[in-house]
Image (cartoon, rainbow, N blue to C red):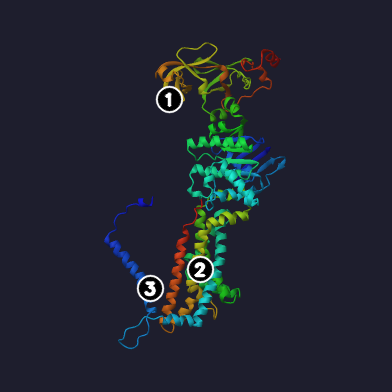
Amino acid sequence: MESMEKIRPRSPLIAKLMTAIAFLMLYVPLFALVIYSFLGPSAGPGSPQAWTLEWYRRILVNGEVLDAFNMSIYVGIWSTLVSTLLGTAAALAIERFRFPGRQLFDMITHVPLIMPEIVLGLALLIWFVVLRITLGPFSMILAHTTFSVSYVIITVKSRLQGFDDSLEEAAHDLGASPWQTFWKVTLPLIWPGVLSGALMAFTLSFDDFLITFFTAGVGSDTLPLKIYSMIKFGVSPEINALSTLMLGATLILVVFFFRPSKGAPTHA
Amino acid sequence: MLELKGLEKKYGRNYTAVKKMDLTIREGEFFSILGPSGCGKTTLLRMIGGFETPSQGQIIYDGKRIDPLPANQRQFNMVFQRYALFPHLSVWENLAFGLKMKKVPEIDLRTRVNEALLMVKMESFAHRGIATLSGGQQQRIALARALVNRPRVLLLDEPLSALDLKLRQQMQVELLSIQRRLKHTFIFVTHDQEEALTLSDRIAVMNGGNVEQVGTPQEIYEYPKTPFVAQFIGQVNTIEGEVKEARPDTILVSGAARRVLMVKPSRDGQRPLPVALPGTPVKILVRPEKLKVLKSAPGPEQNAIEGTLREVLYQGAVTQLFVMPRDGSAPLIVSQPNTAVTARRSFNLGDKVFVAWLPEDCLLMGREAALPVAENSVSIAPPLLTVVGPPPESSGAALA
């Protein structure tokens, strides 16, 4: 069947050109960044710059950068876990049950996607101060969960929409308790949605700057915050190297994010 | 034995899917619930299975109330309409699912799963994925997945409706032979009257949330108790009229164009004459295969309607003839078996013909509902079936 692919009309030259320009605009700056991260210091005026891994070495022995990296991972993992749990549960509730305020709840889950980040960041900061929550890793995890949970809800919900309810009834009929039904039937079938939601949550947490900026306490810089503070002293090749590493990590996550969409179908 | 007592299911305030139902299903019986879509048959089955909570009434199995139990604690299993096989598990794992839930030991589990696969002739498919199976194969696996648990009652929700005709007929035969062998109680929901007639020991015909009639396929077909049952099961011709005279053994009905038709109790006494006062508006119902098309008027012992032959439809086993009565009422459908002399050869379109039938072969009903039957009216029916019926001495006793 795959050989029977639909024959498409040839695209006009202008469309190809536009595509090429768009890709250039997107990727040339990234390429520049990557290339600069590998270029060594000039030996003197006129002499060529040599390829080097010096900046990467400096990053990897820089204690502050490593601390920031650890903080990013720490906050990322916890906010991912919490938002995946909450988001999956919320998606199940929205798709499966009819309760008063369900539609409102469904709408509210989309708000963090469209709300200006700076508003959310500021609101969270004020809220944490009111609640006397010390700014630091804990407040960052809470803040990241607030926006990641929406993404998890959306991906899990889309997975649930094609779900044949009689599968759960069948499990129940065969003697499975509601809990067993969830673990043996529902979760395996929505797993691709849960996984891509979780990866998205982690990526968002790892990359976030604005909200983190508002909710990070003293001495709890994440990587994006660290890069920002380093930039204040001028763009150094070390920052290029660090950014390249972050770019690489994000790319790997994105590859994983698009892969698991080929799960088992949710209906026979 | 499964008993339903005053079982009712309401959705919201206004809609009642199943109305105050009393029904008894015997052990080891192939019991069909037959009705048009929206008659409440699936809701009824889902209440028995534990997927819907009754609004009122009780479900009693073996003397114990089971309606408060959730589905996973009932010893019933269900074959779902769209099979509901687990797409993330193999055929084997699908079958083993129920046994694992019941913590059946591994050795036992293996033999039982193998037995079930063998029963539905799918033993070579054990390790296939569900998505690789055809509709008919999925159907078999769904059946095996339910049967492997050795359910006391097997519930089947239109399991054959997604299959094509040939496959459906084949599965009907297999289903029946499995049921005969295992002697489990099967409760089978269908909208297909032919399927219900073929498979069932007894049928409950449902309409609008009510059971209209419960009986063997023969009782349902030959002696429908309500106009709905008569019209839903098989084809039926309806002739409207008015009661002219009620004699002990015959009711005379005057139709349009001053023709008088006779209705008599069935020969085996299973269908007595109803109580009908002269002047009551009635319907005469008669099956197409009970009618004959004749070229000349039959004797006075038969009912006859004169008309014009409008259409001859050859259908393989039978030929259907459409006769337009002279008075312009609805055409009569006559179904004749295609024996050596086919109907097509003996009649031409436009011929003046007579449609004739025996007064014992038709039913008398009110315009909307069945007519009442007197308590003692059964004895009025003369046991005329001398060939296989009781000898004359006992017929005298029955009359006394």
Q: Amino acid at mark 1?
A: Leu
Q: Chain of mark 1?
A: B
Query: Whole-percent x and y of residue B222?
Result: 58, 25
**Quadrant hosting residue B183:** top right
- Which element carries disc 2, helix, strand or loop? helix
In the displayed structure, does residue B311 sit left or right of residue B190? left
**Quadrant hosting residue A53:** bottom left
Q: Residue at x 54, y 29 (%)?
A: B233
Query: Whole-percent x and y of residue B306?
Result: 46, 16
Name the disc covering residue A30, or none.
3
Q: Is residue B370 above or below residue A39?
A: above
- Is residue A183 visible in the rendered image? The answer is yes
Asked whether disc 2 touches disc 1, contact meaning CB atoms under 8 Å apart, the reply is no
Q: Amino acid at mark 3?
A: Leu
Q: Is residue B106 above or below residue B19?
A: below
In the displayed structure, does residue A96 sit left or right of residue B2? left
- Which element carries disc 1, helix, strand or loop? strand
The residue carrying mark 1 is B313
Query: Whole-percent x and y of residue B108?
Result: 64, 48
Asked whether disc 3 touches disc 2, contact meaning CB atoms under 8 Å apart, the reply is no
Query: Whole-percent x and y of residue B68?
Result: 68, 46
